[in-house]
Image (spheres, grey):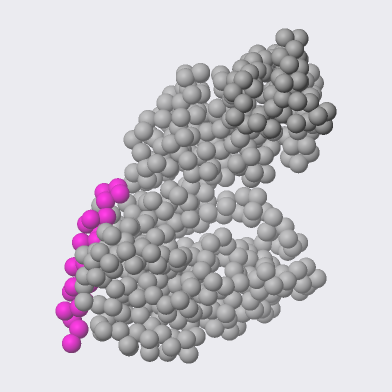
Amino acid sequence: MSSHKLTIEQALSKAKKASKQGRIDIAIQLYKAVLQSRPSHSIASKQLHQLQKIKYKQHVQMPITHPPQDTINTLTNLYRSGKLEKTEKACENILKIHPQAFLVLNILGLSLRRQNKLQEALQIFSQAIKLKPDYLEAHGNLGNILTTLNQPRKAIESYNKVIQLSPNHNNAYNSLCVAYRDLGKLGDALKSCNKAIQIKPDYAEAYGSRGNVFKDLGEIDNAVKDFNKAIQLNPNDIKAHFNLALSLLLQGDFKNGWDEYEWRCKKDSYVAKINRLSIPIWNGSSLNGKTILVTSEQGIGDEVMFSSCIPDLIKKNPKQIIVECDSRLSTLLEYSFPQIFIINTNNGNFKQLKNNNKIDFQISLGSLPKFFRQDVDDFNCNKSFISPDKKLVEKWRKRYDSLDNKIKVGISWRGGKKKRLKSLRSIDLDLWETILQSKVSFITLQYGDHSQEIKKLELKTGVKIHNWIDANPLTDLNNFAAQISALDLVISVDNSTVHFAGSLGTPTWVLLPFAPDFRWMLNCNNSPWYPAIKLFRQSNFGDWSQVLSSVKNELQALIKKQP
């Protein structure tokens, strides 16, 4: 029964007495002890439930106490100084004394968010809102977390709550624009950022948001105007400069586009990379007898595409070129450019460079086009610039020879890391059915495990998409490149697969959304980056029907040409 060995009758009597005296916590403990011995005891169960309700009401009605304003100011300054772990611990200590201090909870949530502890931050902001349902700032911060977590519908609810509390809240309207854009609701996104600008005509961030919406709508001239306006209002706005770069490059304005593209190097991730070594940035000066370090870019596709500039760098006649890259690309680049020395950040080689005093310059791989791609005529017209392992290519050719149809076509149907880009670029495999009925052999090049999706399609349509367990585009890019090289054709949405196929010179058809990435430019069906690539573009936002129909017709024409 208990450590005091009370009978059930004694425990019930004491509980009843404690309850009358207002000692609710003791009464609750006694009733719980009774139920532990006899779970079906109806009186104990009923009384416990009533007391717990009273206890909850008392808790809710407790006056909310806050620490002194000086303490809040100290926490705020600590957070703004970037000492996030110290801020987190300080907030937690204060909340032990003032558990309902929603102002402290908000600061804690902001600190957690900047440390990328998003789920914890989500709970903290929600807790602050429970304590103070009209806490405007917490609703906005909750919306921002939900946006980061790719939950735009829930984020929109939070931002609308902010607007309900403060109808002229320009930040909330701008955040609404971002969330609606993530959902693909561009009309609502445009209305939201227009409202933000109406409330605050000098709101730089809102012009940047509207510029992105115009870019998605295909109104590139308007996008450029808005990005320039954002820069005029805030000359150091890195996002606005970078988005302006992407729009200018999309229009084919390489000279100005690459200049603006350099603003990406002011992002924290790039600054940290540049500052690893105390080496000057190359500015295009003579490289005769000099050693230059080319640092990596973010994303495999970018690293492959910008590697097309390495031959131009070699022509500058440097003493040595050291190229940092993703470790998965090392072997491929060594095959392709035997003149250069390859390192990657995962094998410790980079640490050794800190003691190397013979490196004269460094430059990011994505900055090379600024010197070598100022005009369309500057692009190298070679069909390929990446060389695969010949033995692996032969292995794949032998495999393909065992397939029924003469033409071997690799396909990939999903692309984009972020949820918004995935939804824009990807095409559900079911929609490929009319193409997949063609008399060719199809091979999956899609990274990730899509075996169930492929099996489901085969059961439904009878279409066979060939897959091999030793083909893993995520881990073995050397094998992946050989697999692509042995194909007759690649058909893919915009993802890293098309960069490998284009760089290898394999004929490739790329299926593009209405608002394409900057590298594919506008109003053309070819790519200056990859002569082997042909582009198929959406005519209407989100509508793949015309693209898939065009690809099917092209494929049928290719089949007819075969002897």
Residue for point 37% across, 57% down? 426
Give residue 376's quadrant in the image. Answer: bottom left
Q: What x and y, as percent, mark residue 26?
A: 76, 20
Residue for point 73% across, 16% down? 13
Most foreground residue, 396 or 501: 396
The answer to whether residue 242 is seen in the rendering is: yes
Q: Is residue 124 left or right of residue 351?
A: left
In this view, the residue farthest toward the left is: 560
- Identify the main secondary structure in magenta: helix
Q: What x and y, as percent, mark residue 340?
A: 61, 79
Q: What x and y, as percent, mark residue 365?
A: 57, 65
Q: What x and y, as percent, mark residue 323?
A: 62, 72
Q: In this view, does 330 lie to the left or right of 173?
A: right
The answer to whether residue 77 is seen in the rendering is: no
- Residue 224 against residue 466 in the figure, above or below: above
The span picked out in magenta is 540-563
Most foreground residue, 391 or 399: 399
- Residue 425 against residue 139 in the figure, above or below: below
> Is residue 91 rendered magenta in the image?
no
Give residue 61's quadrant in the image. Answer: top right
**Looking at the figure, which quarter contains the N terminus?**
top right
Residue for point 51% across, 57% down? 258
In this figure, what is the number of numbered marks? 0
Residue for point 37% across, 42% down? 184
